[in-house]
Amino acid sequence: APPSFRACVRGEGTVVGMLRSSLQSVFRRCIWLRMCNFKPSTSNVDIWARKTHISVIWQQERIVKKEPADASGAPDNEGFKHVERLHIPVMLNEVMECLAPQQGQCILDMTFGAGGHTESILQQTPGVTVYALDRDPTAYKLAQKLSQSCSQGALALFGRFSEAEDLLLSAGVRPGSLDGVLLDAGCSSMQLDTPERGFSLQKDGPLDMRMDGDRYPGMPTAADVVNALDQQALASILKTYGEEKHAKKIASALVQARSIYPITRTQQLASIIAGAFPAASLYARKDLLHRPTHVATKSFQALRIFVNDELNELYIGLQTAQKFLKPGGRLVTLSFHSLEDRIIKRFLSGIDMSEKPNLSIRQKIRQKGLERQEDEEGFPATQSSWRAIQKKVLTPQFDEIEENPRGRSAKLRAAIKL
């Protein structure tokens, strides 16, 4: 018989007890957690969860009605037209201006999504070649359709940022040969608007949140996370990835609720989180447009980032972009929350990701300038491999925010490889 939930959490008779002895080495490998000033006692959450979340108990008790799908886990072609209309590419004009594609160039779109940016590149620049990468099975289907219609103009690649290097090499792309890379770190509208994917708290669906869909059956879902981790680990996830001030209160409510019945649905999770707050504060929080937002929004963001390993994937994606860009090549990034933007700023500024954030980014850059000046006195002198295209970060114009409110928090940073 499978061990009880409490026994699993304590590590009795499971692999958890053995894994706890190696948490220090796990901590050293989690550079993005160290960047967030995460203590070693809790930084094991990321790897620990991936080893222990695959709970047969919860998977047997989850009753999920899935839509018909093909072997790749994507819906049929009729659904593509629907999601394609719903998705609006963020900051399209600014992206095209910073990327500046020219005829005969090779561009890598690392997050194809619904293809808005890639289609604009192909339409505005005849003779350009775009490699369209995405980890989402639905997005990959759309990229394949575009590739078939454009013959040699676009090539679809199926995988994560961490798999991009192997995919590019298999496609015949050599390091140092790309002219431009676009990296959009956001979640697409077709993911948020599909209840079966489990990303949105506004539409009820299975608590999944895996961007890869069913491509990796053993990959833990958000339901596995909230049902298998202890209260301290859940609070750490919510605080670190969602920057949630009330992480401990929410984690306590989740633990109490799952002791009665497993948490398997998105609106079930949203209701549990809302129940931890007074009724008056349910929509007390405001977004950038001063609209009321649900108290569970940050928690959903934290679980999505954790399940998909988004921050580590982002850092690997930036490294891959640097490796395959030629000198003078352009990197354009779009981020949608402070955790992503912090990683991008540090990477483009040449600041070590493992350094504790005891200084602001501006102070770090200023300090590096002093180090270069004082190099003859024995100070270490390191410099960035990038030159910024824009002096300041770009954000959406008011008209675009009115048309596409989901892109209101976007930040565009662009740089040229030296």
Image: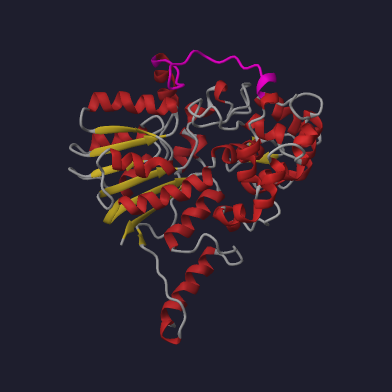
Which residue is situated farthest in the bottom direction here?
377
Q: What quarter of the picture does the C terminus occupy?
A: bottom left
Residue at 40% from the left image edge and 52% from the top image edge: 319
The number of numbered discs placed on residues in the rendered structure image is 0
Residue at 69% from the left image edge and 25% from the top image edge: 58
The part of the image, by quadrant, that contains residue 350 is bottom left
Residue at 53% from the left image edge and 69% from the top image edge: 363
Q: What quarter of the picture does the N terminus occupy?
A: top right
Left or right: where does residue 214 sit relative to residue 22?
A: left
Residue at 21% from the left image edge and 27% from the top image edge: 151
Colour scheme employed for the rendering of this structure: secondary structure
The part of the image, by quadrant, that contains residue 117 is top left
Is any part of residue 91 visible from this angle? no
Q: Main secondary structure of the magenta part?
A: loop
Q: Determine whether 348 is above or below 301 in the image.
A: below
Residue 323 is situated, as x and y percent measured from the top left of the image, at 34, 53
Say whether residue 63 is magenta.
Answer: yes
Residue toward you, 260 or 414: 260
Residue 267 is situated, as x and y percent measured from the top left of the image, at 68, 25
Q: Which residues are magenta?
A: 59-77
Is any part of residue 304 visible from this angle? yes
Residue 297 is situated, as x and y percent measured from the top left of the image, at 64, 36
Q: Determine whether 301 is above or below 353 in the image.
A: above
Left or right: where does residue 247 sit relative to residue 367?
A: right
